[in-house]
Image (cartoon, rainbow, N blue to C red):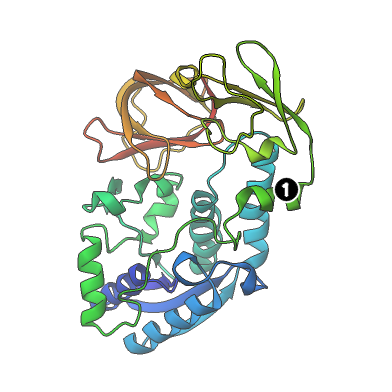
Amino acid sequence: MRVLAAMSGGVDSAVAAALAVEAGHDVTGVHMALSRQPGTLRTGSRGCCTIEDAMDARRVCDLLGIPYYVWDFSAEFVEDVVADFLSEYAAGRTPNPCLRCNEKIKFAALLDRAIALGFDAVVTGHHVRLVDGELRRSVDEAKDQSYVLAVLTREQLAHSMFPLGGHTKEWVRAEAARRGFSVAAKPDSYDICFIPDGDTRGYLTEKLGSRPGAVVDAETGEVLAAHDGTYGYTIGQRKGLNLGRPATDGRPRYVLDIEPVSGTVTVGAAERLSVSVISTAEPVFPTAGGQEFPMRTVIQVRAHGGTAAASADLVDGRLRITLDEPLRGIAPGQTVVLYDPANERVRASATIVRAG
């Protein structure tokens, strides 16, 4: 097959491209330029898609003897990832920009262009398996990325290849070293690439401006503090609340609710964070066999979070999920992914609109 290898500049995409070449595919490497000012992206071990990464990707392609290109997706990145990130926080929701980047850039803009140019598939270094059309967790549970790819459609998955899903991260690094790749020991990227200093609240304040409001106690309605914007808070947050005085019972307070219109952030005891029912927007079914409702399922609500057993039903085209045991800190805007009861196969994904 004629395939396009998405080269991030990291060790995973390097080995994925190498395996595609080894399998006999006609491979072309492409690095995605996501900013016209690369200095505004994180660099080093906390980076992604920087000039440094582009150079690392080029060196790997040279060693593999495959063509290498840089494609400019900066406009799409600003519109579909950065602008979405800002609007979601402004609306009092909690977005996942890395998930949105996979959905809108790597498997929409990139894949669409690849297909238009005659490529059969896109190869990436994600740790996930695609078995008989089913999206499954990686054999390396610690590195599994099925959560962030569960937003993809069946059509997108039909044109995707994930060579690393059957290997551990340790194997990937060893394979990179064996092949002489300079990225063999390169640290994985973390955090949000378009916030260079890691100060998310400061970034949001700069972009959204001051929007003063009050922090109030859920029990008494008493105003405990003032703030410059609800976007500086997330459901379940405990630190950085800057409350004027401790609770009467001496226990810590957590963010329970965010109301951006009135500018009110409500805080209270931890037990009030417990959620038993989740309602979502219209779901995505990445693979066949995920639409038999009601169903028993295992859900995940964070990329690196735990899982929970639940029952799910499809009501008026949206998911209603009832948890076996309550969870804490679930926020509107997060993505919930449904797996089969064995917690291996992805069945559906959807954006959370209400949790209570």
Is 111 displayed left or right of 295 in the figure? right
Residue pictured at 69% horizontal, 35% vertical: 230
Provide residue 209's location: percent of width, then percent of height: 79, 46
Quadrant of residue 226 within the rendered picture: top right
Residue pictured at 64% horizontal, 67% vertical: 74
Q: Farthest top residue? A: 220
Quadrant of residue 199 within the rendered picture: bottom right
Residue pictured at 50% horizontal, 67% vertical: 47
Q: Which residue is mark 1?
A: 205
Provide residue 127's location: percent of width, then percent of height: 31, 57
Provide residue 10's location: percent of width, then percent of height: 39, 71
- Relative to 285, residue 191 above or below: below
Residue pictured at 34% horizontal, 71% vertical: 11
Amino acid type, residue under disc 1 in the picture = Thr
Is 271 displayed left or right of 232 in the figure? left
- Relative to 115, residue 243 above or below: above
**For the residue labelled by badge 1, is the local secondary structure a helix, a strand or a loop?**
helix
Q: Is residue 207 visible?
A: yes
Pointer 1 local density, CA inside 10 Å: few below 14, some 14–19, many at least 20: some
Number of marks present in the image shown: 1
Provide residue 89's location: percent of width, then percent of height: 65, 40
